[in-house]
Image: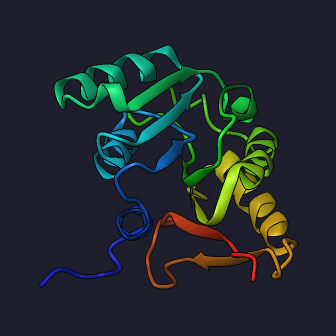
Amino acid sequence: MRNSFINAVEISKGICQSKLANGDTAVDCTMGNGNDTAFLCSLVGEKGKVYAFDIQEEAVISTRKRLKELNILERSELILDGHETIDKYIKETVKLVIFNLGYLPKGNHSITTKKETTLVALQKCLCLLEPNGIILIIIYPGHENGKLEKEALESYTASLSQKDYNVVKISFQNQINFPPELICIEKVCPK
């Protein structure tokens, strides 16, 4: 039997699986090596769409290659731009947004997500989110920019109106080396 609480990434995957269905629209705000983009494409099915953002061309190239190999490239729109520009590219509502913050694995660790652009992107994503939609933010507080993002995101999400959003933070209390943390924001359905 598999453990339920392995890490923040695995918990976010479980939420994605329970939330997304064929035909839904999702956003990967931090494309990286394409793991989350490919996962989302598999969940939204042939009728769905995944927008994915990254500021590094190598991320877009490796993700395009991965999606092509999996025969799911047509379900995606890969965007070489910062996630803070999301409103330039997406005009429809979305069911799910994921941020997997930090730096590109096996890439240049000096290029990281930053609190300023992440907060702008988050604010824009809240406007794009359909009722009952969800935003998942995986935070890596083990490096300086990650620590700053964590503080800024915790402060901002704590200020969101509970009439409009449910906000949950998941952190691992007994793990060493600054394990990733997860903030989930669900848009409340109007009554």
Q: Position of residue 71 (x, y in %)?
A: 19, 28
Q: Nearest the camera: 189 or 97?
A: 189
Judge left or right: residue 15 versus residue 170: left
Rendered-image quadrant of the N terminus: bottom left
Left/right placement of residue 6 relative to residue 131 reads left
Q: Residue at x 61, y 35 (%)?
A: 112
Q: Is residue 125 above or below residue 9?
A: above
Query: Which residue is more in the foreground, 93 or 109?
Result: 93
Q: Count up the numbered dots.
A: 0
Q: In the rendered view, would you say 120 is above or below 75?
A: below
> Is 180 left, or right, of 187 in this rendering?
left
Q: Residue furthest left?
A: 1
Question: Which residue is at 62% across, 76% downward?
Answer: 169
Occupied quadrant, residue 105: top left
Q: Residue at x 80, y 58 (%)?
A: 152
Q: Is residue 56 above or below residue 145?
A: above
- Measuring 56% from the left and 30% from the top, which residue is drawn there? 53
